[in-house]
Structures are given as C-alpha cells and as structure tokens.
Image (cartoon, rainbow, N blue to C red):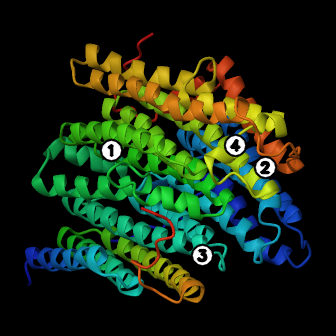
Amino acid sequence: MIPLEWFLCLSAILFVIGAVGVLTKRNAIIVLMCVELMLNAANINFVAFSSYTGGLTGQVFAVFAIAIAAAEVAVGLAIVMTLYKARDTVNVDEVKLLRW
Amino acid sequence: MDLNFDLENSYTAFYPMLVIILFAVVLPAIHRLVKSSKGLAGVSLVGILISAAIVVYNIMDGYPDPIVFNGTPMLTFDVFAAVFSLVFLSVSALVCLLAARYVEKDSHLAEFFSLTLLATAGMMIVASASDIIMMFVGLETTSIASYALVAFRKRDRLSTEAGVKYVIIGGFSTALALYGISLLYGLSGTTNFELMNEFFALNGSSSLALLGIGLMIAGFGFKIALVPFHMWAPDVYEGAPTPTSTLLAAGSKSMGFVLLFKMLLVALIALKADWEVVVGILAILTMTVGNLLALAQTSMKRMLAYSSIAQAGYVIIAIAVATQFAVESGIFHIITHAFMKAGAFIVVGALIYKVGMGEKITDYKGLAVRAPLVAFAMMIFMFALAGIPPLSGFWSKVYLFSGAVEASTVFDQGWLIWLAIVGILNSALSLYYYARVVKYMYVDKPASHDKIRVPTTMAVAIAVCLIATIVIGLWPDIVVDYCAQAASYFSQLPLGRPW
C-alpha cells in the first residue's frame, strides 16, 4: 500500500503550484483554475487521511467540497464572462479602476 | 465505518434557515406576479419576519434538539446561534429596505433579493453549526451568493471589476482555509468542534497542527479582512452596489467572527498557546493599519471600508484574550457595529440613490442644511463608530478593553494590556476621520441649497439603525444579557468578569 506521506507530498505540491499560480498568473481564468487546484489538494488530504485513519467523515467532507468548488467556479466563470463583456479583457492587471 | 442515518431526527433546529431558503427559492417565481422591487422587498421582509419569529419563539420556549448525524451533532440551534441569527436577520431586513428602491431600475430584481436571503441563510447555518462540514457549507453558501451580489450590475464596470476581485480572493481564501482544516482533520480524525478540542487537549500540539492553524487563520482572515489580508475589502465595498456593501460590512463580516470564534475558541482552545500571540499581533496590525489608511481616504465608501477593517481589529481582541467576558464583549461589539455600520452605509446609499452624490467625502459639505434629519443620523453613526458616550459603540469598546485589562492582571498575561492600550489610542485616532465627516456636514457651506428627501423605505431603515444605536447606548443591559448567555456557549473558557 502506498504510504500516507506520499499522498501528503502530492497534495502539498499541488497546493503550492496552485498558490503560486494564483499569485503570479494574470489571466482570470487561469487564476480560477489554480484555485481549483488548491481546493483539490485539500480534497486529496481529506480522502487520504480518511482511508488511513478509518471513519468516513473525510470522504463526506471531500464530496461536499467538490460540490461547493463546482458551484464556486460556475459563479466565478460567469463573473469573468461579464467582465469580458464589459471591458474586453480577462487580464487582472488591466482591471484597475478601483485602486488597491 | 458504517454511517448511521438518524431517521428519528427532528429537524426543528433547521426551521429558521428553512423558511429563509424557501422564500429565496420561491422569490423568482413570485417575480412573475409582483413586478416592482418594492413588492419583492416586501415578500423578502415577510420571510425574514417569519424566520425571526421562529427564532424568538425558540428563545422564549426552549431550544430544539440538535440535528445528529453519525452519532455527532451537526447543527445545534442554541442561544449563541439564536443571538447571531437575529443579528443576521436584522442586517438582511435593513438591506432589503435599502434595496427596495436602490435597485429598482436594475434587471433580475428577484435574483437580488433571493441571493440576499440565501446569503443570510448561510450565515445562520454557520452560527448554528457544531461540525466543520456544516460550517463550511454555510460559509460557502454565503460566499457564493455574495460573489454574485457584488457583480450584480453586469454593465457597470466598477461592479464587475469588484466581482472578479472578490471571487478570486474569496476562492483563494476558501482554499487556504480548507487545506488548513484538512490537516487539522487528519491529525484529530474528527470534524466535530468538541471532539477536536478533546483530541488536542489530550495529544498536544505538533508542527502539522501549527501549519493547519496558520492556513486556517489566513483563510478566515481574508474573509473578515484582517491586515495583512485586507487589500480586497475597500475595492469590493466601493465597487459593489451599496446594499451589497451593507450586507458584506455588517453581515458577512460578523459571520467571519463566528467562524473564528468557533474554530479557535471551541475546536482549538487547547492549543491557545500556539495562536494567541499571532491573533494579538493581527489585532494590533488590523486596528492600526485600518485607522491609518482610513485617514487618507477621499471616497466615503472606501473610508467606511477601512473603518470596518479597524473595527474588526477591536473584535479580534476578544479572541486573543479568550475569556467568556471577552467573548461576550466581542459579540456585543459585533451587534453594535452591525447597526452603526449598516446605518452609515444606508445613508450613503440613500444619498447616492437620491442625488447621485456621496461618493466623495467632500460631497457631504453642508448636508445639515439640505437634509437635517439624515445629517443628524449620520452624525450619530459616526460618533458611535468613534466610540463617543453615551452611544452604543462606546459601551462595546469599554467592555472589550476592560476584558483585556482584566485578563492581563488576573490571568497573569501582561502583554494583553497592550491590546487595550493600542485599542484606546486607535479610538482616539479614528475620531479624526469620523469627526471630519461631521464637520463637513455641519460647518461647511453646501454646494447647493436644494432640499434632499430620502425615500420612505430608506428613511425607515435609517431610523431603525438610529434607534438601535441610541437605545443600546442608553440601556446596554438589554443586549448584554443575551451576549452573556451566548458567550456561555464557550464553556472551556475562564469567566474573567471584571465587575
């Protein structure tokens, strides 16, 4: 059986790739994809911990998290669409009417 | 590994949220019959009132049994949940009153009210959750509904830009918090708050737990805009339609505190030594940076946004102090802040709606001549936010700071006194930018002498906030008793009552 640590390493790598992507990528759609990567890293953790420690709570949580992530990305993509219609761009560097 | 579905469960504990969700689902259908935004706001208010009546009935008549799943409670509608549900329902009612006229020219009206109600239901679920899964579902219900609400004006460039920023920051913070929670679950093997606390009390801390706590604080810190996770808040509050800004500043911010209260003060209280200093530093940073940046603002909504960042810093003191009295004062401040901040945003919204003014603070020059009652209400809200006696904001700050002072002497944690000192200095600092608004309204000459008449629904909303701010200021005991009962939910904490 694959040791638990391997799953944790996989999820940590995915999480870091996602986090770096969110912070460096400028295309809003790629940023949303990176957010999905981070959420799924957490799901891997939940399922891995759940099957190694017994108890189904983690797997139930992962199912909920998948459903929530899907809803989130659906709303997110819709908002990016309206941005594209209003401004002709999905580049987060070009949307700066509101100053940070 | 078996899952036990408790078919005997009574779902009475879910009724207050269920009513709200039903109304939210039915509203788009009602839109076929009721075309005007006033009518839809009226229907939403009926839903909110029914739900509030159920909550009040629960408070009077005893609380329902928790909903149990697989042997552990998932949803407990206790006094803590009831108090916060009433706060969320009042904020949502105020938002509906403001939106009744504010969004009247927009399309997709039913969706606006429907999403507002769904966001409220999510907040109520968070307040009554006794399991992280339930809390997470409630949190995301609110978040996803408010992403859509922020980007509600599809053709408005500011609104869509604020929406994109909010959805990206919101998703990122959810992911951070979820990863942190997954580590805490992996260590303790449970998602129940009480059971997780028992595990950590028995087994102590580990580096993985520290990582989990750090990620979780960062994720939830984004939700309530703690410094250094605050950059999104002013942009989103400024770009969003004003009713949505009200909901975010008064409603979903309060929900963020509930998240941190439940995670840190129930599930992770055994590891207090690990996180108390971090939370204390966050409190000091949030208060100071929020107030300093608010000084420099020229836009009214941005100034209010920075002011609510600073107010979040005051509430976080309660978590760092971690006594029942501190939590009580934290809840008290959340309640008073909800009314003062909602009131200020509603005044801003009413003026934007009526005369298209109010985006700049200098636009408020001479408001006392043009709309004496609105200017008076705004003055009360500003003074209450600054903490001038005898208004509500004064008492909640007194409670917060005396809780910190008490804990620093009685529980031998000398550093806590610094939280109170920095908080008091910050209150003095914040008086500058609040008083500046009052000076513009009352001392400076108006640009025009046309009278401004605020629509009745908005006037009612302003009046409710005004009465709440003054009455709680004169008789704080009305609310404090319930805050104290709600704080008894945190039975792990020492009492720490200074009087």
Q: Residue at x 58, y 24 (%)?
A: B480
Image mark for residue B264? 1
Q: Residues within 10 Å of mark 3 (few under 14, many from 20)?
A: many
Residue designated by label 2? B49
Report the front residue among B120 and B365: B365
Residue contact between numbered discs 4 and 3, judged by CB atoms under 8 Å: no
The disc labelled 4 sits on which kind of residue? Tyr
Tell which tag, 4 or 3, sits nearer the viewer.
4
Report the front residue among A9 and B396: B396
Ranked by sequence position, the earlier of labels 3 and 1 is: 3
Q: CA distance from mark 4 to mark 1?
A: 41 Å
Residue contact between numbered discs 1 and 2, judged by CB atoms under 8 Å: no
Q: Residues within 10 Å of mark 1 (few under 14, many from 20)?
A: many
Ranked by sequence position, the earlier of labels 4 and 3 is: 3
Residue designated by label 3? B157
- Label 2 and label 4 in one chain: yes
In the rendering, at what x and y percent does residue B136 appear?
Answer: 44, 62
Image mark for residue B39? none
In the rendering, at what x and y percent does residue B90 appear?
Answer: 69, 45
Q: Residue at x 23, y 73 (%)?
A: A45
What chain is tagged by disc 4? B
Residue designated by label 4? B364
Q: CA distance from mark 4 to mark 3?
A: 25 Å
Tell which tag, 2 or 4, sits nearer the viewer.
4
Compared to residue B209, the image places residue B6 above or below, namely below
Q: CA distance from mark 2 to mark 3?
A: 35 Å
Tell which tag, 3 or 1, sits nearer the viewer.
3
Q: Residues within 10 Å of mark 4 (few under 14, many from 20)?
A: many
Q: Residue at x 51, y 70 (%)?
A: A97
Q: CA distance from mark 1 to mark 2?
A: 32 Å
Report the front residue among B467 and B291: B291
The disc labelled 1 sits on which kind of residue? Leu
